[in-house]
Image (spheres, rainbow, N blue to C red):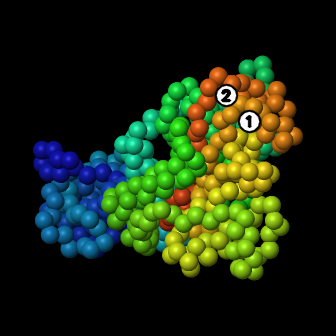
Amino acid sequence: MGEEGGVKVHGWVSEIRDLGRIRFVVIRNWREKIQLTLKRGVTPDDLFELTDDLTQESVIEAVGEEVAEKKAKAVDREIVPARIIVHSIAHPKLPMDPNWKVPAQLPTRLDNRPLDLRRPEVQAVFKIEASLIHGMEEWLRENGFLRVFTPAIIGAASESGAEVFRVQYFDREAYLRQDPQLHRQLTIIGGFERIYDLGVNWRAELSHTPRHLSEFRSIAVELAFIENEQDTMRVEEEMIRAGIKRVVEERSKELELLNVDLEVPKAPFPELRFPKVYDILEEMGKSVEYGEDYDTESERLLWQYVKQEYGADFFFVNRFPFKVKPFYVMKEDETWARSVDLLYKGLELSSGGQREHRYDILVSQIREKGMNPKSLEWFTKFFAYGAPPHGGFAVGIERLTMKMLDLPNIKEAALFPRDPERVLP
C-alpha cells in the first residue's frame, strides 16, 4: 500500500538493534517481517528521538522508500522511513515473549493468547485452518450442498443427558447443542436434499486430554436419497481431500514454517468393518469383546494396521454394534448398524452413516434403547409425514487441524479454547 513519499507499512515491533550511526527497527504483521533502517545524517533526527522509547510489541506505522535489494535475510522487506507514527507503546514487561526467545508452556500461552497469536507459527495454524475450511466448503457448494444454520439452543438433549450444558432460557431450562444432527435431519425432511452446517457445538465432559474441547466446531453434512452409508463416505472423503488440496496449494509457506509435509490423501479411503475389526485387533495384541465398542488404544492400533496394509492415514470403520450407537442409526441387522466413523492418524474425526428414516422402526429403536418415545416426539413425529433415505456426518475441525499439523494438543487448533477450567480470555 503506497502513499505520497513512498510505501506505507505497519506492524508490531519485534526487535530494535542500535549500532550507533544506524538503527534497525524490525516490525511484523500477519503477512511479513519488515526492517526499518534509520541512518544518522540521512534519516530525520526526530525519527531517532521517536524510536528511542520504542518497546517490543509497540504498534507503529511507517512511510518511506523500499530498498530494492535488502541485505537482511531474516526479513521480507527493508524500508528507509521518512515518517513513523506510533499508535501504541507496549509495556516493557511482557507476560510472554512472542519472539519465542523465552519459550512458554501451553497454559501461559493460553492465559496470554493475544500475545501468543502474534507468533508466526501460531498464526500459521489458523491460516491453514481457514484454507482447509474454504476448500471443504467450496467442494460442498460445487456439488450442490446448501449451507444452513441450525439452532445452537435446543429444548431437549440430543444425546447423552450427562454431557450437555444447561442454560436458563427465559422461564425454563434449555441446552447447548452437542451436535446439529437432529435438526439437519428435520431440514432434510423439509425437502432440502443436500445441506451442510458449519458451527459450534458443546460437550460438558470433564475431559482433560490433548484431544478434547468443551466447545468445538464441526462441518456437518446431510444428504437425501442415498442408497446406503457408502454414499455418505464418498462425500466425506472428497470433502476432506478438497480441503487438504487447498491447504497444499495456498499454504506452502505456513506448512514449511511448521515443518509439515502434507499430501492430498488418495481416494477411496480404506474401510474396516465390524466384526472383522475384532480379528484385526486380536492380531495386534488387543482383545475386545464381541459386540462391544473399542477404545482409544484400539483406534491407534487400527491406524497402524491401515498404515501397514494400505499406506493410508485416513480410514473408515463401518457397521458398529447397534448397542453402542444412538437410536437414530439404521440397522444392517439385529447386531450391526450402518454407522461409520472416520479416523485420521488413530483419532476419530467424525461419526456418521445412514439414518433410520422409517417412522415405526425409529420409534421402536428408541424403545430398544430404553428411552421414552414421548421425549423425542418433537423430532420423530415428522418422520410420519414422509422422510427420504438419508445420512450424513460431522467432522471436528480442530481435531482435523490438530492431526493434519501434528500438533501435540487440540487447544492449539482453537483460537481461544474452552475446557473444564478455562472460560477466559
The location of residue 173, given as percent across then percent down, is: 78, 27
| Quarter residue 95 falls in | bottom right
Kindly give the residue lying farthest to the top in the view shown: 171
- Of label 2 and label 1, which has the lower sequence position? 1
Q: For marks 2 and 1, give the CA distance.
A: 9 Å
Q: Which residue is mark 1?
A: 362
Tell me the tag on residue 121. Answer: none
Q: Residue at x 70, y 50 (%)?
A: 332
Q: Quadrant of residue 363?
A: top right
Q: Looking at the image, is 73 positioned above or below residue 166?
A: below
Viewer-proximal residue among 177 and 281: 281
Foreground pick, 105 / 204: 204
Along the viewing direction, whichever of 260 and 392 lies nearer the viewer: 392
- Give the left or right position of residue 281, taking residue 85 as reference: right
Name the residue at 12% across, 48% down.
Answer: 5
Q: Is residue 313 visible?
A: yes
Residue 387, given in percent of the width and then of the height, sits at 61, 30
For the residues bearing labels 2 and 1, Cβ distance under 8 angstroms: yes
